[in-house]
Image: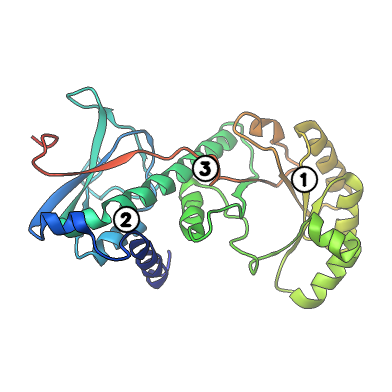
């Protein structure tokens, strides 16, 4: 799915950040061939395998993911995992083996775990939202906004896909979104749409952030493909969406702002096509650990 050169570029930057010069600890352990086990320690959706694998491949290590029940295939991103109590009471589930020079394993350990933990955490949060939509038979799209971590967007957007949500727009080149600051800078919604259409051409959709029913109607009338009802409570959002739908059935209607796990169900409506929110902020990571063999956990 992701071009390999993009992953390799990210891996290089991550390793360069963590190993700018010497790695004194790795120098101490040497380069004997060693095997380590990857454990998941909290329940969640597995996500981030392409990045995890690429980190260790760059360090001349191999990764072998355990097979799923039945033994037909290895664990894949998107799998819900729920570790059970280990013999000492801790929750652990072994999911992969990593083999390579000991110093290389330890150089990649923290970077690989950080990426896997955060990617899996975002995918888990996305999955929970997707599950709520399915349980309430809502057929719109939940999407993750561009509120991502600089330099880490590709990973976070990938995690959203694994969790089953839409990635919205990837970047400023993907789709035109005229927010309040664009509109104020141009003078009006109509002027902003006119000016952006003159440069964006026919190939890009235009979305306009709207604060009211009047704003939404003006945007739809001037050719917006998507009207985004911003920071409206569920009752207001449903009422405005229904009114806009009656007048402009061809326009996609999105709601954003203040949507959370504890209130998203209240926004579900046949008149609302998209619910967008930040999925990479305020997410709880999934806990993983990497243990070199012969430390007691594998005996």
Residue 70 percent across, percent down from the top left: 22, 41
Q: Which mark is residue 99?
A: none
Residue 175 percent across, percent down from the top left: 68, 65
Q: Which mark is residue 52?
A: 2
Assign a secondary structure to mark 2.
Answer: helix
Q: Which residue does the image show at 13% across and 55% down from the upper left?
A: 28
User: Where is residue 1, by image quadrant?
Assistant: bottom left
User: Where is residue 8, by image quadrant?
Assistant: bottom left
Q: Which residue does the image show at 39% across and 66% down from the upper left?
A: 13
Q: Is residue 53 left or right of residue 180?
A: left
Which residue is under mark 3? 126
Tell me, yes or no, if residue 175 can be seen here.
yes
Q: Is residue 190 above or below residue 286?
A: below
Residue 214 percent across, percent down from the top left: 92, 48
Instruction: Mark 1 or mark 2: name the one nearer the start of the chain.
Output: 2
Instruction: Mark 3 or mark 2: name the one nearer the start of the chain.
Output: 2
Q: Which mark is residue 230?
A: 1
- The answer to whether the residues at label 3 and label 1 have Cβ atoms under 8 Å apart is no
Judge by depth and name the residue closer to the eye, 3 or 150. 150
Q: Is residue 34 left or right of residue 227?
A: left
Residues at marks 3 and 2, CA–CA distance in whole angstroms: 20 Å
Instruction: Mark 3 or mark 1: name the one nearer the start of the chain.
Output: 3
- Residue farthest toward the top in the current orientation of the protein: 89
Assign a secondary structure to mark 1.
Answer: strand
């Amino acid at each position: 799915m992701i071009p390999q050169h993009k992953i390799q570029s990210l891996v290089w930057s991550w390793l360069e950040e963590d190993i700018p010069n010497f790695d004194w600890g790795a120098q101490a352990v040497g380069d004997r061939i060693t095997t380590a086990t990857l454990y998941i320690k909290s329940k969640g959706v597995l996500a981030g395998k392409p990045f995890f694998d690429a980190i260790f491949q760059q360090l001349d290590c191999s990764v072998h993911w355990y097979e799923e029940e039945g033994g037909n295939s290895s664990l894949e991103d998107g799998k819900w995992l729920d570790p059970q109590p280990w013999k000492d009471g801790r929750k652990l589930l072994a999911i992969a083996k990593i083999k390579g020079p000991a110093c290389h394993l330890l150089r990649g350990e923290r970077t690989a775990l950080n990426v896997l933990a955060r990617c899996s955490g975002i995918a888990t949060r996305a999955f929970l939202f997707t599950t709520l939509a399915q349980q309430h038979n809502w057929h719109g799209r939940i999407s993750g906004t561009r509120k991502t971590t600089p330099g880490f967007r590709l990973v976070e957007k990938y995690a959203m896909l694994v969790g089953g949500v839409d990635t919205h727009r990837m970047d400023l080149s993907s789709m035109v979104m005229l927010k309040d600051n664009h509109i104020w800078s141009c003078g009006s919604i109509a002027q902003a749409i006119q000016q952006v259409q003159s440069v964006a051409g026919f190939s890009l959709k235009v979305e306009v952030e709207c604060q009211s029913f009047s704003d939404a109607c003006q945007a739809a009338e001037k050719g917006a493909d998507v009207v985004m009802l911003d920071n409206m409570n569920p009752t207001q959002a449903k009422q405005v969406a229904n009114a806009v739908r009656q007048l402009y059935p061809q326009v996609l209607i999105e709601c954003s702002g203040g949507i959370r796990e504890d209130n998203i169900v209240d926004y579900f409506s046949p008149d609302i096509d998209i619910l967008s929110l930040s999925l990479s902020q305020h997410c709880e990571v999934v806990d993983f650990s990497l243990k070199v063999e012969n430390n007691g956990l594998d005996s």
